[in-house]
Image: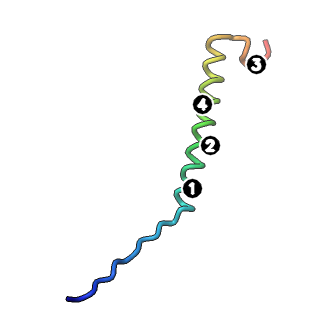
Amino acid sequence: MSSTSIARTEYDMAVVRGFALSALLWGCVGMLVGLLIALQLAFPAFTFRRI
């Protein structure tokens, strides 16, 4: 019999962590923009222009 060695695979978790953090950041930004648009549609006083 011959002994076989199993190669270990190591992942670069910095890439995964960066992607997850950027997804959370852009998710929060998108939710805040959506909230602002919804507030402006529901309550016209939330618009930022001067009449």
Find the distance from the CA under tag 4 to the CA under tag 2: 10 Å
Of the residues under marks 2 and 1, which one precedes in the sequence? 1
Q: Secondary structure at mark 4?
A: helix
Quadrant of the drawing holding the C terminus: top right
Residue identifier under label 3: 49
Q: Where residue 28 appears, x then y in whole percent?
A: 62, 36
Find the distance from the CA under tag 2 to the CA under tag 1: 12 Å
Residue at x 64% of width, y 30% of height:
32
Q: Secondary structure at mark 1?
A: helix
Q: Nearest the camera: 5 or 40?
A: 5
Q: Where residue 38 appears, x then y in whole percent?
A: 61, 18
Give the amino acid at mark 1.
Answer: Arg
Residue identifier under label 4: 31
Residue at x 62% of width, y 22% of height:
37
Q: Where residue 27 appears, x then y in whole percent?
A: 57, 38
Q: Find out whether the residues at labels 4 and 1 contact each other: C-beta distance under 8 Å.
A: no
Q: Find out whether the residues at labels 3 and 1 contact each other: C-beta distance under 8 Å.
A: no
Residue at x 76% of width, y 19% of height:
49
Give the amino acid at mark 3.
Answer: Arg
Q: Is residue 3 left or right of residue 33?
A: left
Q: In the rendered image of this protein, does residue 11 appear above or below residue 7?
A: above
Of the residues under marks 4 and 1, which one precedes in the sequence? 1
Residue identifier under label 2: 25
Question: What is the number of the mark on residue 17?
Answer: 1
Find the distance from the CA under tag 3 to the CA under tag 1: 40 Å
Give the amino acid at mark 4.
Answer: Met
Q: Residues within 10 Å of mark 3 (few under 14, many from 20)?
A: few
